[in-house]
Amino acid sequence: MTEAKKVTVVQTGSAIGRPAYQRQTLIGLKLNKIGRTSVLQDTSAVRGMIAKVAHLVRVVEAN
């Protein structure tokens, strides 16, 4: 059985002053403070969320 691909995301920007949908997207990515990291499954839904807040996050690695 193959293991699901993972993607590691780090928050690099603040959600202060951002639209509500961007703050909610960060919460959906399990991020809420600068410097927090989250390891998520690499799905199209997660990639879409990352694209919405690409200016606030950095993708560290994709296995």
Image (cartoon, rainbow, N blue to C red):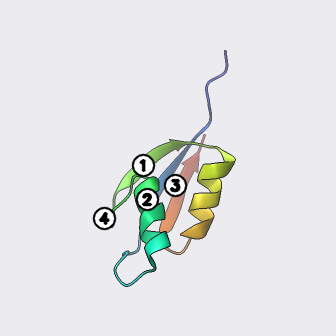
Q: Earlier in the sequence, mark 3 or mark 4?
A: 4
- Residue beneath the point at 43% across and 64% down: 24
Give the position of the C terminus as an image quadrant: top right
Number of on-image labels: 4
| One can see residue 16 in this view | yes
- Residue 38 place in picture, x, y as percent: 42, 49
**Residues under numbered marks 2 and 3 in contact, where contact means CB atoms less than 8 Å apart:** yes
Structural distance between the alpha carbons of marks 4 and 2: 10 Å
Amino acid found under the numbered disc labelled 1: Ser
Structural distance between the alpha carbons of marks 1 and 4: 11 Å
The residue indicated by pointer 4 is 33
Q: Earlier in the sequence, mark 3 or mark 1?
A: 1
User: Is 29 on the left-hand or right-hand side of 46?
Assistant: left
Q: Earlier in the sequence, mark 4 or mark 2?
A: 2
Amino acid found under the numbered disc labelled 3: Val
Structural distance between the alpha carbons of marks 3 and 4: 16 Å
Q: Does residue 21 sit above or below 5 in this rendering?
A: below
**Residues under numbered marks 3 and 4 in contact, where contact means CB atoms less than 8 Å apart:** no
Structural distance between the alpha carbons of marks 3 and 1: 10 Å
Q: Secondary structure at mark 4?
A: loop
Q: Which mark is residue 27?
A: none
